[in-house]
Image: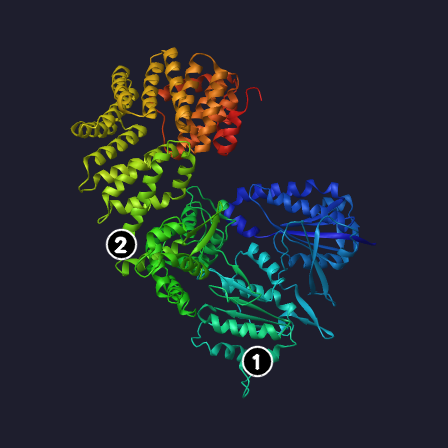
Amino acid sequence: MSEVRALLLTDVVDSTRLAETLGDAATAELWAAHDRAARDMLASCRGREIDKTDGMLLLFESAADALVYVSAYHRALKALPVPLAARAGLHVGPVILRENSTADIARGAKPLEVDGIAKPTAARVMSLAQGGQTLLTADARQTLAETPLRLCSHGHWLLKGLAEPVELFEASEADARFDPPHDGEKGFRVVRVADRWLPVMEVPNNLPQPLTSFIGRVKEIGEIRQMLGATRLLTLTGSGGCGKTRLALKLSREATPAFPDGVWWVELAALTDPLLVPQALAKILGLKEEAGTHLTQTIAAHLATERALLVLDNAEHLLAACADLVHGVLQCCPHVSVIVTSREGLGVAGELTYRVPSLSLPEPMRGATPESLAPYEAVRLFVERARRHSPQFALTRQNAPAVASVCHRLDGIPLAIELAAARVRSLAVDDLNARLDQRFRILTGGSRTALPRQQTLRALIDWGHDLLGPSEQALLRRLSVFAGGWTLGAAEQVCSGDGVAEDAMLDLLTALADKSLVLAEARDGAVRYRLLETVRHYARDRLLEHGEGQTWRDRHLAAFAALAKEARPHLRDADQQVWMDRLETEHDNLRAALTWSCASGGDIVAGMGMANALFSYWYVRGYRAEAYAWYSGLLAVEGEVPPALRAETLSGAGVMAWQKGDHAAARRYNETALEIRRTLGDRLNIGSSLINLGLVDFDQGHYEAARRRFDEGLAIRRELGSPRSVAAAIHNLAAVAEAVGDHDRAWQLFDETVQIYRRVGDPWGIAISTSNLAAVASHRADHRAAHALDVESLSIRRQLGDRPGIAESLEGLARDLCALGAPARAARSWGAAERLRDEIGVPMSPMARADYLARVATARAAIPDAAAFDGAWEEGRSLALELAIADAQQPIGT
């Protein structure tokens, strides 16, 4: 008996690839999770399961019920541990329902079977959908009184087995994009031209046929579609090899139904004469020059009444000629649209430009897995192209970190990734990654049929470089000395002179950005510039080829040494957060400058001055191991250095060695610094060296020796020093008092340091002193006071970005929480602190560790279930740092 029902078919995409990636056990677990999610919602939507394979055949009372279900189904698949995407097709029509008997079911039959034309119709609609997409027929659309989903028509499609075209609609969430259906063997799109349906593939066009698959770009395609609806001239810009041509080809194919008079592709890369631009288009259109008439006028007259799309590919070297042609055509042809690919826009009235970004790519990560890399377009492109060259290639747990690194170091540039993928024929991915510093020698394996500039990475960038003027070329070379970006002011300071005028810097940077060689990015209300790493390597090679490396790296070192010197007095005053954030932004440049100062020909004096100026920044922000490496490296360079400067560098190395727990090195560095300072009669810094040596004594449990050194250093600082340096000396004496059990004396001295730091406005000093006051309060059994002090300390350290201090405060709060009867929360805080210390490589002092282990043992004993304690600890390790901080700061009892 025939009944009108809604049939929904679903199919999980890429299921075979997933099975190969995950393995049998994980795949079975994933499918079980899929089935639970799919079936849990059926009853509430008045649906029944008819059949099940990689997807499902479902029967609903109405199209509205089916859409409620499928919308929830898509969301549920995204939320699975390994997110899935399914395509779905919905049709409403007559179906024949056949209920099977109990005996038939026992023999393997399904409880309910469906026959009729509605079933294959729904299947063919589903086959045209993309992952995450729901398509429905006009018959299903007409039955919908209302739906919270947005509906979009994708035009008419001729489906296999059906005599008349079917209009297809897409149903999607309010904020989701609409994607066109796939052309497939079960159907193709048609457009009515005159009185007949014409297959889209028969719309006149000369679009090239791509030989490789199109990867990703879903976000970009959605954004560009909207722009195409608002303009008749769209220019896709971007760096060389970023995929402008493939994206334009994809968009042109999709747009074909809207241009029944033709879609015409004009390849300009091989042209060198601007006069040949209109001739190239005229040849494609079958037009000849007419005496006395400009060829652009002839083209415009031919297209005047046509609905056509023109695509000018690779226009950057013929911009003026392309602009003239496009302007002439668009003025006279109201139904013609133009897409241009170029490294910069044409500059024609009404033009919209869209910068094509690199493919989405992961940060380099040690723990990268095939599952964690699956969402990234750059990785998917690398794997797909690698398999074309080596069919056995697979993304595995062993090579996933190297693949992530390769994609990141190549900036997600599609052509660079394709050239790299071609090398898997002869190189393991780890070896490929290790050789990318010589990327212009390695990445040379492009297709012999490709444009010459697309056959090697070097040739690709040469093409854009050769279009630059002399000043632009010179500036691009000089910009390679920056690492991690720069500001306009920094470019003026470092790169001006010798053919690059300072007052022309903004115009030159803008020109390089327009040509897609420099990226300009708005950040915190300011513009910051940077080079893609591949372009930076190229520009650096050019700098060295011109013999200019010494000059401009010296300028870069001088500029960032001056920044460090300017920042130094602010790193312990009320503006310290602002200045530390500024140094954080420039940290890669500071590293590059220090690297050059240590190199042959570098300025070791400038490097030591910079390192000493950065001491507080490195200490507070947790770069202590890195700082120790810089100090050690600088001290190993031979060269004439003023004794006072060498002593300060030795002192910095000593403190960082002490922080690492290398007491022998800390004592050696500080004793050498003290000897130099005694020779110079530098009394204030003699006091500093004595205090630093006292810290080493203290860590080794020599409390009386430490106290003597602290007393002597304090006396000198009281005589000569600033209140801040006096407070630091008092702080150390307080630590000795606490270590020997004199808690009242420790409280008095720590409180004195807090008051001094509050008076001079030193947030970091306040934070460390309140943290130590909290420890004393804990020893005095005033645990609520300890908790309040630790909360204050943690708040300041969080604002400053003091990661070692944050770890210490989390440990302090864990101690407080344990004492106040919240051992599970204590375990979470300890877990979060442990992970943070692991990340920054800052261990506890031996004395702090002994106290820490004792308190952890107490907390563990307070929870009868050891597994619960360990689970809370692991939860803390996995918490985002901000969540861990918020959890630890919650008032007791909440």
Q: Residue furthest left?
A: 679
- The quarter in which the N terminus is drawn is bottom right
> Crowdedness of circle 2 by 10 Å Cα count: few (<14), some, many (20+)?
few
Camera-nearest residue between 153 and 652 = 652
Q: Is 626 situated left or right of 316 in this image?
A: left
Tell me residue 298's x, y (percent). Answer: 57, 81
Circle 2 — which element?
A: helix
Residue 667 position (above or below residue 128): above
Q: Which residue corresponds to mark 1?
A: 297
Residue 588 position (above or below residue 691): below
Where is residue 229, by image quadrant? bottom right
Camera-nearest residue between 625 and 154 = 625
Q: Which mark is residue 346?
A: none
Q: Which residue corresponds to mark 2?
A: 551
Scheme of colours in the image: rainbow
Residue 290 position (above or below residue 667): below
Tell me residue 76's x, y (percent). Answer: 63, 43
- For badge 2, the amino acid type reads Thr
Q: Earlier in the sequence, mark 1 or mark 2?
A: 1
> Crowdedness of circle 1 by 10 Å Cα count: few (<14), some, many (20+)?
some
- Residue shown at the point (61%, 77%) measured from the top left: 303
Q: CA distance from mark 1 to mark 2?
A: 53 Å
The answer to whether residue 212 is seen in the rendering is no
The answer to whether residue 143 is seen in the rendering is yes
Q: Is 664 situated left or right of 83 in this image?
A: left
Circle 1 — which element?
A: helix
- Residue shown at the point (29%, 47%) measured from the top left: 558
- The quarter in which the C terminus is drawn is top right
- For badge 1, the amino acid type reads Gln
